[in-house]
Amino acid sequence: MTQGSDISRRSLKDWERQGEILGLLDGKIAVVSGIANKRSIAWGIARALLREGASLIVTYQNDRFKENLDKLLTDVDVPVKSLLLDVSNDGLMTEFVNQLEVIAPKGVDILVHSIAYADRNDLEGRFLETSREGFSMALTVSAYSLTELTRAVYPSMKKAGGGSIIAMTYQGSTRVMPNYNVMGVAKAALESSIRYLAFDLGKEHIRVNAISAGPVKTLAAAGVKGISQALHGTVEGAPIPENISTDDLGNAAVFLSSDWSRYITGHILFVDSGTHIMG
């Protein structure tokens, strides 16, 4: 695997091999979590990483998600490994680490965290009514899981000589978004975790960043009341009056995964047509 390479000094010929242009991520190994179906943000990112030459390891939460994942992978023309990962199960986390060591003995370069969950009852209505159980679940699955998964992959990424960790967030972390409620609090915790993890791991050349996505049509978004209005609002009021796609998020993830961003860490990259700058 190529590590710590100075891309800024490469010529075009350096990227050519037998008449082909190498991908930005050629030789790197990526772990992508959170793929639920073909509309998932994580799937858009996975496809972009594959396009740029990364070798892919994907995770699934249970047998139902594995069936969906297997169907998606039938259209991929390169080998992709899949591993069981349930961030709420400590035993499965240990098994995940053990299997990762076997699959990627030289280390992992990229980790994509695209995991979030909250009870629908805690998304609707007033935040005031959030249950203790719902709050704990949302914060554990949507925020703490980043720290837990980073700790699990850390030895492998350290072995590789560094790498890039990318999480997914939304501006509901800093602004009140009706019907986002406890997930907004969870995303705020996630973003704070990113800064602390970036500080902890920077000396070992491990970068930790997040992509803050604008409204995008996914299965998860469909569970948030008002998503149609949010999509319409982007077209009506964003500086770039167009909605984003999972492909756009995939391209942003490629940048954060590549050596082009090797001095960017603790950062929230907005891919939202500029919506976040509007009052």
Image (spheres, rainbow, N blue to C red):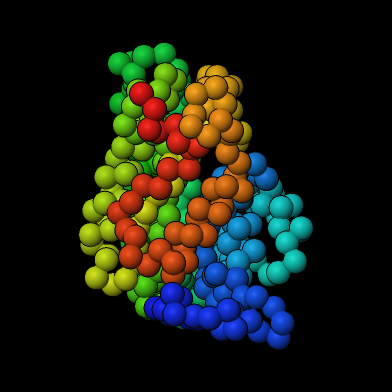
Q: Nearer the viewer, residue 128 or 24?
A: 24
Across and down, in percent, residue 161 comes to 37, 78
Q: Quadrant of the C terminus?
A: top left
**Vertical relation: 205 (above or below) 267:** below
**Vertical relation: 234 (above or below) 61:** above
- Residue at the far bottom: name it: 18
Q: Is 228 placed left or right of 205 in the picture?
A: right
Residue at horizontal 71%, vertical 52%?
72
Residue at horizontal 60%, vertical 66%?
52
Q: Nearer the viewer, residue 120 or 180?
A: 180
Q: Is residue 202 visible?
A: yes
Across and down, in percent, residue 8 comes to 43, 75
Across and down, in percent, residue 202 comes to 27, 66
**Vertical relation: 51 (above or below) 245:** below
Q: Nearer the viewer, residue 86 or 250?
A: 250
**Vertical relation: 118 (above or below) 22:** above
- Residue at the far top: name it: 125
Across and down, in percent, residue 148 comes to 35, 55
Residue at horizontal 44%, vertical 80%?
9
Residue at horizontal 67%, vertical 45%?
38
Q: Is 204 placed left or right of 50 in the picture?
A: left
Q: Is residue 62 visible?
A: no
- For the image, the number of numbered tags is 0
Q: Is 231 placed left or right of 141 in the picture?
A: right
